[in-house]
Image (tube, helix red, strand yellow):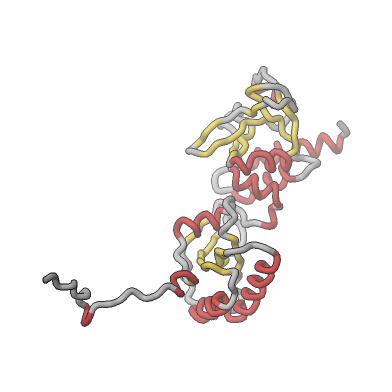
Amino acid sequence: MSASGTAAAGQVEHMLRQVAPGRYDAYEALLHALADPSSGRLWMLLWHGRPGAPDAQYGNMEVDGVAYAPCVTSAQELSASGWNRAHEVVTGRDIARTLYPDRYGIWLNPHAPGGGVGIPWPDLRRIATGLDRMPAGPLRITEPAVEIPQFYALLAQHAHRTPAVRALRRAWVQPALGTPYLAIGLDLYDTGPQSVDAVRAMMQQAVAAVPDGLPVSTVALSDEYDPVGMWLRAKGRPFYDREAHSAPAAPAGGYGYPPAAPRAY
């Protein structure tokens, strides 16, 4: 390996040494190093089989209920780990694409003093799909406290005229790094190109009612890997629900009393 290649390969280990509790900036820099094809090489530990074999299996470990595949960051760390089975050298982006759909993260240098560093599967997804496309975690997600009833009312009106929309939910998202924003969860009947274009137009029409400086983003509730979408499905209450809106009203009893039962003779 050339001198420049050696320096690039050492970038992951350099960033790894900077990571500490609360140092989200250092952790984000580590993710960028892993996503860089020139620096993000990892030595994945194979519990079974040989590299490229159909029966090859990565090792696995569980920390706080989250699954990880252990790996090391260099040939030197592989030697220091004492691992005596096979291993496979891959890029960070390739292993991210392989593992996150099964909700596996990676654990870097578990043999090292302090136990190494874990990268959970949501961050592997960010590496696989583009770090700048999704907010930096861990995310704090809550019900929005900001009062913008005009925006919600206008968005609900446009949603009612957009047949692809089943329901809309909302959340306030505080990334570990970056600006907090309002997330609108889109529950759609159809995710084809025409429906997506109609929903995009719906959002553009309603966003004029958002106060200046308030960032708004959307998330598809059909995305089973998006952490904001997962929160919205589990805890978010719809502020627009087409099916509830169109359901017939239940018959009411007079003056607050239940309807009288038929009298038997």
The quarter holding residue 75 reads: top right
Taking the spot 59% from the left edge, 62% from the top edge, the residue there is 219
In this rendering, is residue 256 above or below 73? below
In this rendering, is residue 219 above or below 156? above
Residue reaching furthest to the front: 265
The quarter holding residue 214 reads: bottom right
Observer-nearest of 259 and 98 = 259
Residue reaching furthest to the top: 84
Taking the spot 63% from the left edge, 34% from the top edge, the residue there is 108
Q: Locate the N terminus and report the quarter of the image it occupies.
A: top right
Measured as percent of width and height from the top left, residue 20 is found at 58, 42
Taking the spot 69% from the left edge, 68% from the top edge, the residue there is 194
Taking the spot 74% from the left edge, 40% from the top edge, the residue there is 40
Q: Locate the C terminus and report the quarter of the image it occupies.
A: bottom left
Observer-nearest of 102 and 145 = 102
In this rendering, is residue 22 above or below 59? below
Give the total of numbered labels. 0
Can the viewer see residue 183? no
In this rendering, is residue 72 above or below 11? above
Can the viewer see residue 249? yes
